[in-house]
Image: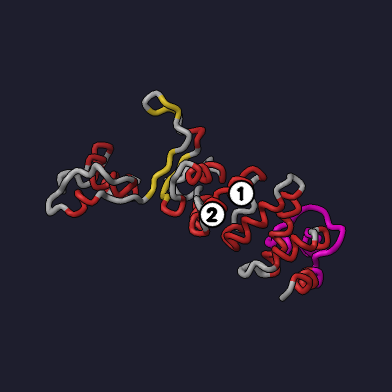
């Protein structure tokens, strides 16, 4: 369906001219009188680009267009479309988590190759589940996770993160980010026939090898209680 067809579909579904606010697709279907988004207020070139994104249906295009109006008023409308063209539905999942500065940062990271669609999917998952996942700080925001990619980390491999404000100082130095990736064990330790301390790995796999399976049997985390025998608890 072309951009005009999508626009017509939205009008028939209740999206009408003159409505106030920037309603999401979910809000649109819940509003008896129709949605809160006026597709006529999105410039034709922007609307065409949004509706050509393959994995966005008409209602998702509506939500993307509504956010375009918001970000365009802050000078980041073009960045928002670029983000969506690179990430599709997963990018749209972040719509309510991003501010204008985040959108600009995300576009830069996507353009440079420091972030991709897999990172976007994992970012959305972490923000959606942070209230239930103890590995994700309750006050972690989109900017906290974007800082991972900005610091050379891999968002798609990240299993835990706390916000910069709660990290503080380590060895007298200010730490801007704290996150934990799945990681891996170095070749020498991984290929050894007997347990060998890992000096070349990183992330959770490195920590687990050196501290939960020290000497092939010792779990150093158990000093904090038997609960820490469970690797997921230790994470």
Question: For the stretch drawn in magenta, what is the main secondary structure?
Answer: loop
Proximity of marks 2 and 1: CB atoms separated by less than 8 Å: yes
**In the rendered image of this protein, does residue 77 appear above or below residue 16?**
above
| Residue at disc 2, secondary structure | helix
**Residue 127 shown left or right of residue 17 in the figure:** left
Disc 2 packing (10 Å; few <14; some 14–19; many ≥20): many
Disc 1 packing (10 Å; few <14; some 14–19; many ≥20): some
Taking the image as drawn, is residue 111 in sight?
yes
Residue situated furthest right in the rendering: 18
Location of residue 101 in the rendering, given as x and y in whole percent from the top left corner: 64, 43
| Residue at disc 1, secondary structure | loop
Location of residue 129 in the rendering, given as x and y in whole percent from the top left corner: 50, 52
CA–CA distance in space, label 2 to label 1: 9 Å
Residue situated furthest left in the rendering: 194
Read off the residue under disc 1.
97
The quarter of the displayed image where residue 35 is located:
bottom right
Location of residue 126 in the rendering, given as x and y in whole percent from the top left corner: 49, 51
Residue drawn 54% across the image and 54% down it: 124
Residue drawn 69% across the image and 59% down it: 64
Read off the residue under disc 2.
124
**In the rendered image of this protein, does residue 65 appear above or below residue 177?**
below
Q: Nearer the viewer, residue 163 or 119?
A: 119
Which of the two labelled residues, at mark 2 and mark 1, occupies the earlier sequence position? 1
Residue drawn 44% across the image and 46% down it: 153
21 in the magenta segment: yes
**Residue 39 shown left or right of residue 103 in the figure:** right
Taking the image as drawn, is residue 218 in sight?
no
Write the start and end of the magenta stretch as one range. Answer: 11-38
**In the rendered image of this protein, does residue 184 appear above or below residue 223?**
below
Q: Quadrant of the N terminus?
A: bottom right
107 in the magenta segment: no
Q: Nearer the viewer, residue 57 or 103?
A: 103
């Amino acid at each position: 369906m072309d951009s005009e067809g999508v626009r017509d579909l939205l009008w028939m579904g209740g999206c009408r001219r003159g409505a106030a606010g920037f309603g999401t697709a979910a809000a649109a279907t819940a509003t008896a009188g129709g949605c809160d988004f006026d597709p006529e207020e999105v410039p034709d070139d922007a609307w065409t680009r949004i509706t050509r994104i393959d994995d966005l249906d008409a209602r998702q295009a509506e939500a993307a267009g509504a956010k375009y109006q918001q970000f365009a008023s802050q000078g980041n409308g073009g960045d928002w479309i670029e983000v969506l063209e690179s990430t599709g539905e997963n990018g749209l999942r972040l719509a309510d988590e991003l501010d204008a500065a985040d959108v600009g940062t995300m576009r830069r990271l996507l353009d440079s190759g420091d972030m991709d669609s897999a990172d976007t999917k994992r970012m959305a998952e972490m923000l959606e589940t942070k209230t239930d996942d103890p590995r994700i700080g309750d006050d972690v925001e989109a900017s906290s996770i974007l800082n991972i990619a900005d610091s050379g980390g891999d968002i798609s491999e990240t299993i835990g993160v706390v916000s910069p404000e709660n990290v503080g100082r380590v060895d007298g130095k200010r730490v801007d980010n704290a996150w934990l990736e799945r990681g891996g064990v170095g070749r020498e330790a991984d290929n050894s026939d007997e347990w060998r301390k890992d000096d070349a790995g990183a992330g959770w796999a490195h920590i687990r090898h050196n501290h939960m399976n020290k000497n092939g049997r010792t779990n150093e985390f158990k000093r904090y209680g038997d609960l820490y025998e469970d690797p997921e608890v230790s994470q």
